[in-house]
Amino acid sequence: MDLILDSADNPLTGKRWWAESDEPWQTLACCMEIADVVRSPDPEKFRSHFPVHQDGSCNGLQHYAALGRDSAGAFSVNLTPSEVPQDVYSAVVALVEEQRAKDAENGIEVGFNCFFNFYFQFFNFESNAKLIFRLPKFLKDLLKEK
């Protein structure tokens, strides 16, 4: 609490704890709001107008799922209750792999370079989200090769 109050009272001349945050200006604003709360005559009745940011799960797909009343899509982007948070990007990777396996069973060959590039990129990404975001460019480059 001392660092929060120091940040609120002395943002430029104090310990500058707020500046170490990933979002320093939001942290400083929050420190100032907390200082106002704890110093108010009745903190339990303090009315805050501080915005609380909450990241969604693939916000664009959330809008499409809601607009299309797509219950499966809504589930995959965490618009419906679930014990475990869903990862739509992993679901997309699983569907792509399922289709690739079916194609292979039907004799549709995918060149070695495609597999090599795909898996090389897949295992070097921190998350499936980064892979999926890159797929359109990857596929465009792959088609240029042919």
Image: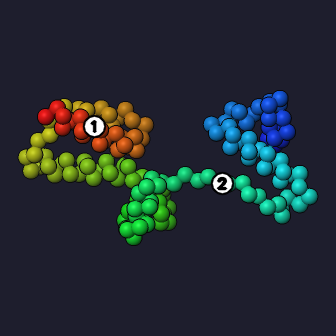
- Could you tell me which residue is drawn at 77 percent across and 31 percent down? 16
Indicate the position of residue 83 as horizontal and vertical percent values.
Answer: 50, 61
Counting labels gives: 2
Q: Quadrant of residue 43?
A: bottom right
Query: What label does residue 52 carry, if any?
Result: 2
SS at mark 1 in the image? helix
- Could you tell me which residue is drawn at 35 percent across and 53 percent down? 91
Amino acid at circle 2: Val
Residue farthest toward the right in the current orientation of the protein: 41
Residue farthest toward the bottom in the current orientation of the protein: 69
The one nearer the camera, 108 or 63, is: 63
Q: Which residue is mark 1?
A: 138
Residue 71 visible within the image:
no
SS at mark 2 in the image? loop
Amino acid at circle 1: Phe
Against 101, residue 46 (above or below) is below
Q: Left or right: where does residue 22 sit relative to residue 139?
A: right
Indicate the position of residue 62 as horizontal and vertical percent values.
Answer: 44, 60
Q: Quadrant of the C terminus?
A: top left
